[in-house]
Amino acid sequence: MRRLAALAALALSLCACAGSTTAVAPRCLSGATPRVGRPAPDELLALMRRERERAARAPSPLVRARILESLPGLFPDVSDSVGEPRCREELAAENAAALRAEPLVFSRLLVARLRTVHDPRLLLPLAARGQEERATAYQLGPDEPGPAPPRSLVRHLALASIPASWLVNDQPAGRRLVLDRLREGADARELLLLHGAAAALLREAPSGDPPRAQGGAGPSLLRAWLPDLARRLDGPADRVALELVLRRLADVGTYAARFGVGPEARALVERVLAARGELPLTQGLAGAARDLAEVARGALHDLDVPQRALAGADLPPPRRDRFRVWADWLDAEPAGGKVPAADALARVRDLDGELAALRFGAARCRVIEELGQWLPPDEASRRFDALVAPALDGERVRLSTETLCRMRVALRLDGVDEARRVRLLLRLLSATPAQIGPRDTSGDEPRPALGAPLDEDPVGEVAARALARNLGWIDRHADLRAWLEAQALAPVPPGARAAERWSLLQPAFERVLALHASGGPEARPETARAVVRAWMASIRAAEAQQGAADALAGEIASARLRALGEHGGRAGLADEVGAFLGERKDQRAAVIASYLLTL
């Protein structure tokens, strides 16, 4: 009887669980604070509601907008829970009502809404040309000195938030919009935004012999690009136009032969190569001519030896001051806004209060990230040691979700003296496995099915990513440079995680090589020659594995081949490097490197 009762109880509980899957999801942005019955997500949801309330009573539109932009990062992923709150859907509905207003008030708050909307159906009408005329002139807030952005920013923010695949594949209206803009557009910024959609159209065309690839949107676009590229190359020097030209030139190399316009494309590419990239578009832009010439050489190789993959070629590491669509434009303050120190400190006090009460790593990490965004420079400098202290224990590094977050934020604090950040960076880079403690998961939500990889190196990866954003530190700090020199001379360590870290460090290694090959006051030519020869040995070792190495190891070998062409001549090893590259003339990276060796 007990067994039957137990089975009956189990059946009842299963029925109850099954029935609960149809429960109405709790409201997310209004009413009582939502809960899903798991402590870590519930803590994030409660933090989100408190932050939303702070935004409502913020002292200025700028502070309110910046808090609102951070809210989606507090929506937990609880899609595996019954009764998941529909936070994103509610935010989209709330924003939809605001975006349908007449007139559409163009202000910092509208910018925040556009940055947090990800519903293509809502954004598509705003992305249509002329729709920005619904908006008023930009209304400067008290903390925005100007100049005010043009109303076209409304259209561009909407366009940037629509996934390229949705535009091209899922909606006829989106596809028409893309094709119209690509065919008629002259604005290089807008065309850069649409380049992902253009690349998707190029990939649609059938492979095979050129006559079968003549029709379709992609081939017609590429044919129109050729005269447009020629005009832009002869146009005035411009960072934005240069980015567009480089991307389109790489695609010309990938697709022109397939689309039956190989001869026309070759003429354009050979013109760039004959001028070594020194064309009106690149005049006065440091590094631009060499970047243009390198992309053109890659395009010529792809015209001669069509690649099997239909994906466009990646652009090489830039020498130029690259225009970044997000960092330099769409994510920048639209009207030069700057939060007053008093308001920033008030915000910091609120975040300090949250950090004192929160328990779980996910919510604590989000608050630490926010602190990094709001700390005034003087306050950041004063707090730096306290920020990193929980991550360090004598000579050891503590490893947890929170300590990794603290390291990332500390290395990004521009208000802190560079030397202090470099000391932290070097400590993290040089930490041995024995100096990194076991991962502390006490602040994480218990998820037994998930575990950290045995070969993970998160501390090294955090440091390597920070260094990649601050390569100038290498020129100014001899101790950092010395550590990098030793690593650049060493073999690439085995294992996927180590290879990932080395891939992240490769730009830093190249910076060291460039410095020692430069002939400058800090240069040591013998070190440059040693690194060049060590890299030739590492490439031979990778080749000897005959494909056993993972993809990252192959990427490192390709990057080093390119670096040999870039720096081998200045290191005084032009003949030795040239012979090495000549033995690999069937490899794309080696062909481009051989060309760089001649520039």
Image (tube, helix red, strand yellow):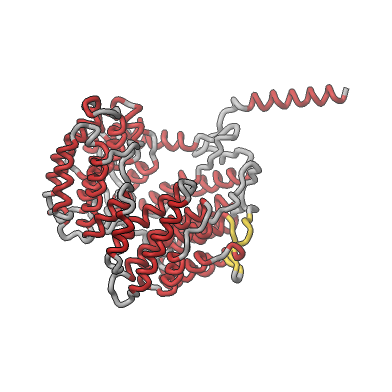
Q: Is residue 148 depicted above or below 224 in this figure?
A: below
- Residue 337, position as x, y percentages in the image: 31, 56
- Residue 357, position as x, y percentages in the image: 60, 56
Q: Is residue 451 depicted above or below 512 in this figure?
A: above
In the displayed structure image, the side of residue 500 where residue 247 appears, left or right: left
Please give the count of numbered marks on the rendered protein. 0
In the image, 401 versus 351, the foreground residue is 401
* Residue drawn at x 36%, y 45% as measured from the top left: 112
- Image quarter where the N terminus lies is top right
Residue 429 visible, this angle: yes
Q: Quadrant of residue 227?
A: top left
In the image, 294 versus 243, the foreground residue is 294
- Residue 582, position as x, y percentages in the image: 30, 54
- Image quarter where the C terminus lies is bottom left
In the image, 496 versus 402, the foreground residue is 496
Q: Is residue 394 depicted above or below 340 in this figure?
A: below
In the displayed structure image, the side of residue 369 where residue 235 appears, left or right: left
In the displayed structure image, the side of residue 393 where residue 429 appears, left or right: left
* Residue drawn at x 30%, y 46% as measured from the top left: 107
* Residue drawn at x 41%, y 54% as measured from the top left: 556
- Residue 356, position as x, y percentages in the image: 58, 59
Q: Quadrant of residue 18?
A: top right
Identify the residue at the far right of this view.
1
Residue 342 visible, this angle: no
* Residue drawn at x 37%, y 55% as measured from the top left: 559
In the image, 19 versus 248, the foreground residue is 248
